[in-house]
Image (spheres, rainbow, N blue to C red):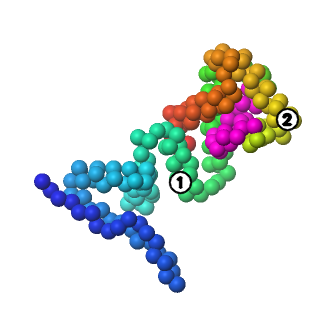
Amino acid sequence: MRQYKSVGTVEKSIHSPRTQRKEYGFYIACDDRAILNCVNAMLLSHGLVGLSDTEGKIHYLIDGRRGKNYILGQVKERVLPLREASPENSMYEDAVTYRAIDTVIRRYGFQETLMGTRILRVLLFRLYKEPKLLKCASKSLYPLAQPEFHITASQVERNLRYAIRKSTRLKENTRVITVLRLLLDATMSEVVDKYGRA
């Protein structure tokens, strides 16, 4: 049986008065099993591994065993900020997000003529960008619809409840927060399934 060695240490910063540099870990593997064990150990500890090709481009391997929400969170928090921000990228990502939201809204049978459905579309877009807003919807999420629709937070919730009641695929007594969470998960799945890295 062939042996493999792990050389180096986990990445750590070395501070000095003049400069700050990083020390990197090198892993030498002699067979396929050793490669898989090293990658698996890194994925288990960090959830993400960056691999560089000969052109210097970094390809990220994300631990998919942790679920789709974890994957999307990693892409948003770690990978997307590393890219150069450009208006074209931003506009493309927004268009992809809105298209996924529209697909999900139609799938759940919301009537597009209702104000509650239009509010739902705006709030789902904001939730896609910042899922933490769902924790305190009445104070942080509902007010985001006020400038566009010129209504109070309580009117936002009332319109959402009415749209949910009129939906063909949701139960009448379903809570607004539950529906928002369901539609957000469906939107995230739609983006991953149809657009991959978008």
Residue lying at 23% horizontally and 63% vertically, measured from the top left: 5
Query: Residue 73, how many percent across, how many down?
Result: 54, 46
Upstream in the sequence, badge 2 or badge 1? Answer: 1
Quadrant in which the N terminus appears: bottom left
Give above or below for 23 relative to 31.
below
Write down the region rendered in magenta.
Answer: 117-138
Instruction: Report the amino acid beneath label 2.
Output: Thr
**Does the magenta-highlighted stretch encompass residue 179?**
no
- Can residue 148 be seen here? The reply is no
| Quarter-of-image position of residue 176 | top right
Query: Residue at the location (41% across, 40% down)?
Result: 65
Amino acid residing under circle 1: Arg
Q: Which mark is residue 169?
A: none
Image point 83% across, 38% down: which residue?
Answer: 146
Gap between marks 2 and 1 measured at Cα: 36 Å
Q: Are marks 2 and 1 in contact (CB under 8 Å)?
A: no
Where residue 69 appears, as percent x and y from the top left, is: 52, 40
Q: Residues within 10 Å of mark 1 (few under 14, many from 20)?
A: few
**Which quadrant holds residue 139?**
top right
Check disc 1 and report its element: helix, strand or loop. helix
Residue 56 percent across, percent down from the top left: 43, 61
Q: Which of pointers 2 and 1 indicates the residue nearer the eye?
A: 2
- What's the residue at 44%, 47% (across, down)? 62
Which mark identifies residue 78?
1
Residue at label 2? Answer: 152
